[in-house]
Amino acid sequence: MADTVSPQVAQFLLDRDDGLVWAWFPSTGADHEDHEVAVAAAPTLTAIWPGAGERVREEIDDFDDNHRWHDDATPRTGWRDTHAEYRYDWLNGLAVTARDASVRRWPFGSEHYATSMSSAVDDLLAGGYDCFYPPQQNCNRTQSNGYFRVTLRGDQIVSAQFGIGSLIESGRQRHLLSEEFPHGLTFLTEAVRRPVTERIEQARRTGTSFAGIVAGTVVTIDARRGAVDGGDLVAYLDIQIGAPLAATLPL
């Protein structure tokens, strides 16, 4: 794929009758002037619910244009129509929840996969992050060009994003996860910490991207591979865990 094209991945949840219950169109990290979330979501939702795609395109395009110079780093918006409720922000993209529909399976709420920000801060500081919470929700690690940012509902982590490098030499990982997270990914609950960590480490070993469900948790990994020579590998990974599910973000 050309460097100028951003990969786009969407997640869908259907009921037993193949009706759409929930959908997530993640942000690609591209310039908001490109409206890439709207480009992906509008035709998809039009095919499911007549008229929904046109409204999505209008809402997102207007929001992106009107908030281009907004002081808030993560402005958000929401709206509803006869089909669904919609939540959109630049960090997480677009989440769609069908009205009058429910399922009893994936995806789980954030209490299943995430802890609180206040309980995670000390471990982030121990890993070299500059993190002052509250109110800061975007922490940086200058030693490795790393970052850690979250969306919250109160103190509860709803979604977490972080960037970490990978350096494979002679088949061994030289940039250990413990350098940045000395006590492990403690912002995750014990129910999901081990399987999610193993999936991340697999992506770091191979320098490959991933988008899917791990232990009932939405995990998205965008891997950018650099130098590759024999068994050696240099890569940087942008990782998101969790998604803005219905009723988790404040209106």
Image (cartoon, rainbow, N blue to C red):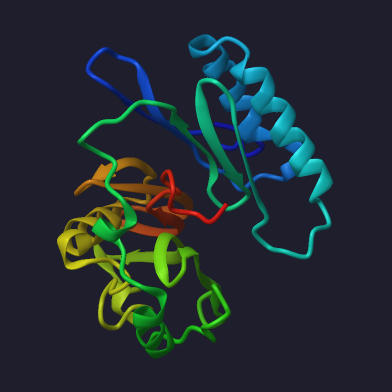
Percent across and percent down for residue 57 are: 69, 26
The front one of 62 and 203 is 62
Query: Which residue shows up at 27% across the image and 47% down it?
Result: 108
Against 77, residue 116 (above or below) is: below
Against 198, residue 119 (above or below) is: below
Query: Which residue shows up at 28% across the image and 66% down it?
Result: 188
Percent across and percent down for residue 13 are: 33, 28
Percent across and percent down for residue 165 are: 43, 66
Regarding residue 201, the answer to whether it shows in the image is: no
Percent across and percent down for residue 36 are: 65, 34
Could you tell whether 66 is left or right of 105 in the image? right
Regarding residue 240, the answer to whether it shows in the image is: yes
Residue 185 lies in quadrant: bottom left
Query: Which residue shows up at 72% across the image and 64% down it?
Result: 72
Against 82, residue 161 (above or below) is: below
Count every numbered label the image shows and give the total: 0
Query: Which residue shows up at 19% across the image and 49% down it?
Result: 215
Q: Quadrant of the N terminus?
A: top right
